[in-house]
Image (cartoon, rainbow, N blue to C red):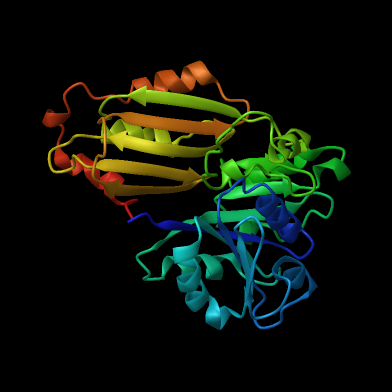
Amino acid sequence: MKRIPVIVVAGFLGSGKTTLLNHLLGGSRGTRVGVVVNDFGAIGIDAMSVAGQVDSTVSLSNGCLCCAVDVSELDGMLAKLAPLVDVIVIEASGLAEPQAMARMVLAGENPRLSYGGLVLLVDAAEFPDDLARHVRVADLVVLNKVDRVTDPSALAAEIDRLKPGVPVVRSSFGRVDPALLFDPRPRERVGQLSFEDLLDEEHDHVRYDSVEFTGGAMNPLRLMAFLDARPKGLYRIKGFVRFDVPGHRQRFGLHTVGAFLRFERSAWPGPRRTELVLIGTGLDVAAIRADLAACEEPDPAAVDPQSMLEVLRYTA
């Protein structure tokens, strides 16, 4: 059974969360996105601008669904959305504690859902003084409104000081490529460019690097060492890993958003090999491929099954 990732988007009031959500909905490209706006009992203007009306689910023409709920209704709404969408994005109130929202999703027992990480929006133009507490729980930081500041690098450096190594994506007007957060459905291109294709050309996203890697069985300890020390600028990894260690010969789906990491086990439907896609900016493609090649294991049958414990810690 495919599990639906639930991504929490948090940030202080005015950081651009609703703008980001509208951008994700507009760029969903056939992916069914369920957006839950949570305002802890006080649905505000921002929530209404996404959901259209309070305490209801609104179907959009692109197959996405939006709703606005109180925190007490969150589990029920997630359960309703799960069979209908490919991904769920929760916009936490600007007053909400990101830790509390993440814990709520992690504590859920719905087998159709899985936690997909916490994305923290930070307003570069009104850089908050009390950011440290929120950055500590962020898997990915979006430094928004960089068009309004003269030195975004200094702000990114301050975020790195507060949480060393956390990936920081710079954006203007909440324009973040949806592929950094979830898997858009592949589009079939037939004949002329579609209107959607033309819109994509106008979206001035940061141009991201994409590294593809195909290999054999991976050594669990070496791969986890690579994942624990991911290269700077690497925002997302997705794909499938073959370990082939005795007792662990299933396919391991790998999904990361920033620092968040999850494996999901399933049966092999086809060729048994490792296939990964890594997305980021300023990546040293040759070095990453070499590092991953160094993680390959020529004799997986001889690997101690106990070494898989590091992987299993992150298995959904």
Q: Picture coordinates of residue 182 (x, y %)?
A: 53, 47
* Quadrant of the image occupied by residue 56: bottom right
Q: Picture coordinates of residue 27 (x, y %)?
A: 67, 47
Vertical placement of residue 225 versus 214, above or below? below
Vertical placement of residue 291 versus 59, above or below? above
- Could you say which is closer to the camera, residue 259 or residue 200? 200
Q: Picture coordinates of residue 84 (x, y %)?
A: 49, 63
Vertical placement of residue 46 versus 162, above or below? below
Q: Dividing the image into 4 quarters, which one contains the C terminus?
A: bottom left
> On the rendered structure, is 96 left or right of 139?
right
> On the rendered structure, is 223 left or right of 297?
right
| Residue plotted at (41% across, 71% down) | 108
Q: Picture coordinates of residue 75 (x, y %)?
A: 48, 75
* Quadrant of the image occupied by residue 155: top right
| Residue plotted at (69% across, 72% down) | 95
Q: Dividing the image into 4 quarters, which one contains the N terminus?
A: bottom left
